[in-house]
Image: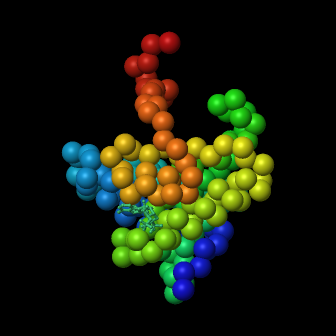
Amino acid sequence: MTEIRQLKVKDIEGVRELEISCIKEYFAATIENKWEDLPQEWKDNLGASSKNHFKAYLDSGVSFVAVEDGEVVGFIFAQILHHICDEDNLLWIENMGVHPYFRRNMIGYQLLRECVKKGREMGCTVAHAMIQEDNAPSILLHKKVGFFMDRREVALMDLRDPKLKL
Ligand SMILES: CC(C)(COP(=O)(O)OP(=O)(O)OC[C@H]1O[C@@H](n2cnc3c(N)ncnc32)[C@H](O)[C@@H]1OP(=O)(O)O)[C@@H](O)C(=O)NCCC(=O)NCCS
């Protein structure tokens, strides 16, 4: 029986391992660089479960894990952002994943639903998730929970780039 519950400090190791394996999966499918060739410091900072980011998701009250036999088999990392996109309280879903062995058992669905339910209880008026356009499982999952997809492309700028001319 899978338990869906809020993220706790004790989950750090299990959830880190699972998030990294989901990120590796994404890299293998989309990015030319081999995971092993990427700088360690860069890899250490990836993901919501990384050292610098975990606490924000832990404290947010809207991050959840799925636990089976004491092992983390799914996660959703989210936080509430204030005064953004014309909203006072926006539920920002940063990342989610389910262990490949446990997929298609409605674990992702339950995680996303709990997160949105809790966000709503905490005063969020909008939920936001960024999903790659080729990620059909995730798109279909979000639609099933009640999200709609728009065609927005996101433009990014690296503000730490020393060559930046501003
Ligand atoms: C996306 C992901 C979290 C879905 O988790 P899951 O537990 O397998 O999903 P669920 O079993 O709860 O599926 C719920 C619904 O989502 C859709 N769905 C999920 N996986 C699907 C797939 N592989 N193909 C088609 N539809 C899929 C279906 O509508 C499904 O309902 P149904 O089973 O009644 O058809 C999982 O595939 C995953 O971890 N992927 C890798 C990481 C990732 O892409 N994360 C999202 C980043 S935005």
Task: From the top left corner, tell me how far across and down residue 153 is, in percent.
Answer: 43, 31
Residue 5 occupies quadrant = bottom right
- Residue at 54%, 86% (x, y): give it: 1
Check the image and tell me how it is coloured: rainbow
Task: From the top left corner, tell me how far across and down residue 100 is, in percent.
Answer: 36, 70
Task: Judge by depth and name the residue closer to the eye, 74 or 124.
Answer: 124
Task: From the top left corner, tell me how far across and down residue 39 is, in percent.
Answer: 33, 48
* Drawn side of residue 30 relative to residue 50, left or right: left
- Which image quarter has ligand 1? bottom left
Task: Judge by depth and name the residue closer to the eye, 52 or 115.
Answer: 115
* Res 51 visible: no
* Res 69 visible: yes
Residue 100 vertical position relative to residue 150 in the rendered view, above or below: below
What number of labels is visible?
Answer: 0
In the rendered image, the residue lying farthest to the top is 166
* Drawn side of residue 135 relative to residue 10, left or right: left
- Residue at 44%, 18% (x, y): give it: 164
* Drawn side of residue 139 relative to residue 69, left or right: left
* Drawn side of residue 28 relative to residue 129, left or right: left
- Residue at 44%, 46% (x, y): give it: 131
Task: From the top left corner, tell me how far across and down residue 4 is, in percent.
Answer: 60, 74
Residue 44 occupies quadrant = bottom left
